[in-house]
Image (tube, rainbow, N blue to C red):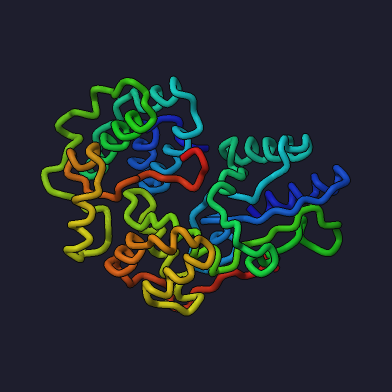
Amino acid sequence: MLLAFDEIGRAAVAAGTRLQIAVYGGSALMLASNFRFATEDVDVSRLQQPWPEWLRTTINKLAQEHRWSEDWFNDGVVFHLSALADPAEDHLEFGTFPRGPEEPPGLMVYLPSASYLLALKLKAIRVNDPLRGEQERLDILNLMKVIGISSAEEAIALLARYFPNSGAAAEKQKFLLTYMKKDGAVDAPEYPRRSD
Amino acid sequence: MRPNTLAEAIERIRSGELRDVALAEFVDTFLSADAAAQYRSIEQEPEITNDVRLDALAGAIAEYLAKQHRLGRVPKWVYGANRRLDEPWFTTSSTEPAMQEYLAFSSPAEFRSRNIFTEERPLRRARARA
């Protein structure tokens, strides 16, 4: 994924522009945590519509080269984001691309804070999904550990900070957080770590 | 590259790919297709494996997706005897009776009828159209 970001950054420079994106979900954890390794599509913040030609060309080229799906880079997650998330406080700079001092940056990548990312996962609370439920449960446990919270009540208070309606009707979250298995988190989870 | 069909996803799992990854990628394929392609992606019966849970889960996924997306038809293979479990399977690592009771209540009919007890909206993906 880092190599793909390098390519997007170079294409932006060649097009005489600079692109800023935030990366969410499992792809954010894969990029910047020490507890998520599975490959994911890249869920990013809202992109200019229609995409500029240089970006569409680059994304399609990368999909073909790596045999990725056509929508490996998409902004479908925008629908689920919080209007209350602060652009500055809840987003941290992950890095600029291409990496290295010898090339000008064309892509700036931001990541949601651990609190915001946890709130997004608590809102969806897919811990019993037959496909990725166990991964979701571990992500939630690890993020809670990163933030330093351990109770369902603390987690729901955090959910309410970003999603007041979900936080006010969080009986399901409270039940699942209370009764889900609590072990499996890594000893010292870290998120976010910068690209350098 | 994502599997184009459910049968292909099951074949990948038989070849060693992680179950959750192959099936989640198949669901992404399904969700990004039009109705005709969605039906084609579940039409072919996947091979029976040595994993009875996987065989039942494949049937549940195909029937559930077909009905959720109102494809108007469900492939007959999903109703085969091999697509149903003899013993209940709760899709949770929790052993709490309360959690199992919750899943027994919440599981959609396409899963519950196969003795699979899961959340009320399984296979959700973090995309707007999901």
Looking at the rendering, which quadrant does residue B102 occupy? bottom left
Specify whether B31 is left or right of A9.
left
Q: Given the current orientation, which residue lies at the most extreme left position?
A: B86
Assign the C terminus of chain A to one quadrant of the image. Answer: bottom right
Question: Residue at the spot x=48%, y=78% of the render?
Answer: A188
Relative to B57, residue A20 above or below: below
Specify whether B111 is left or right of B10.
left
Q: Horizontal and vertical percent for residue A154?
A: 42, 75
Relative to B44, residue A5 above or below: below
Relative to B40, residue A107 above or below: below
Question: Residue at the spot x=15%, y=42% of the render?
Answer: B85
Q: Horizontal and vertical percent for residue A52?
A: 77, 37
Question: Residue at the spot x=68%, y=61% of the render?
Answer: A110
- Residue B87, can we see it? yes
Looking at the rendering, which quadrant does residue B123 occupy? top left
Question: Residue at the spot x=75%, y=57% of the render?
Answer: A108
- Residue A42, can we see it? no
Q: Horizontal and vertical percent for residue A161?
A: 52, 67
Which residue is nearer to you in this view: A87 or B55? A87
Specify whether A60 is left or right of B130.
right
Specify whether A73 is left or right of A58.
left
Which residue is nearer to you in this view: A141 or A63? A141
Number of numbered labels in the structure image: 0
Q: Horizontal and vertical percent for residue B15?
A: 37, 41
